Image (cartoon, rainbow, N blue to C red):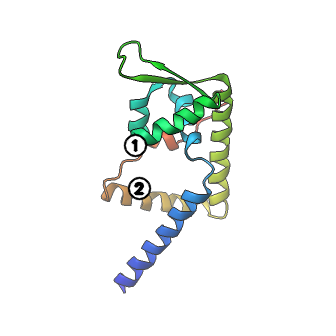
Amino acid sequence: MDNELNLRLLGMMHQISYLMQTQEKFRGQGRLLVLLNRYGALTQRELIELTGRRSATLSEQLEGMEKSGLILRHKNEQDKRNVDVELTEQGKLAAAKALQNRQSYADELFAAVPQRKKQQLAGLLDALLHTWEIPINEEEYQFYNTEE
C-alpha cells in the first residue's frame, strides 16, 4: 500500500512540476528582473548563485535582456573579472509587471484551496525540502508591497 501511494505522490509531483515548467508566467527573464529590482545591481556571479543557473545559460538570457533594453552590463569597478548587471528604467517597469504576474499566477493556482489547507501544504512541502536538503530562498518567495 505504501509503495502504491509513494508512486501516486511521485506522479502527482511530476504533473505539478510539468505545470510549473510550462505554465508559470514568472520564469527566465522575469525572475532575473525581479531579483535585480529587489537587490539592485548584482554581478553575474551573484545572479548565478541566486538562481542556480549555468553561466552560459545566464549569459545568453542577459544578452537578450540587454538587447531588449531591460538591463545594462558593465565591468565591476573593484574586480574587472566580474560584470555588474543593473536594470534600466524599462527594466524596472518590466520587473514590476513580472512581479505582478507572479502574484496573479500564485493567486490563480491556489484560489480554490482553503487557507487552512494551504498552511498544511506549506508545512508538508517545507518538511520535504528540509528532509531532502533542498535550500529555498525564502526571501525571494515572500510577498512585498511594490507601492511603498
Give the answer, above or below, for where 116 lies relative to 80: below
Q: Quadrant of residue 144?
A: top right
Residues tagged 2 and 1 counted as in contact (Cβ below 8 A): no
Q: Secondary structure at mark 1?
A: loop
Position in image of residue 123 (x %, y %): 44, 58
Q: Which residue is mark 1?
A: 54
Q: Nearer the viewer, residue 58 or 9?
A: 58
Give the answer, above or below, for where 41 lies relative to 55: above
Q: Nearer the viewer, residue 38 or 82?
A: 82
Circle 1 crowding by C-alpha within 10 Å: few under 14, some 14–19, many from 20: few
Please report the residue visible at 38 percent of the width from the left and 37 percent of the height from the top: 49
Q: Which residue is mark 2?
A: 126
Locate residue 65 relative to residue 123 in the image: left or right.
right
Position in image of residue 44 (x %, y %): 43, 30
Amino acid on which disc 2 is placed = Asp
Q: Secondary structure at mark 2?
A: helix
Please report the residue visible at 38 percent of the width from the left and 31 percent of the height from the top: 45
Q: Quadrant of residue 98?
A: top right
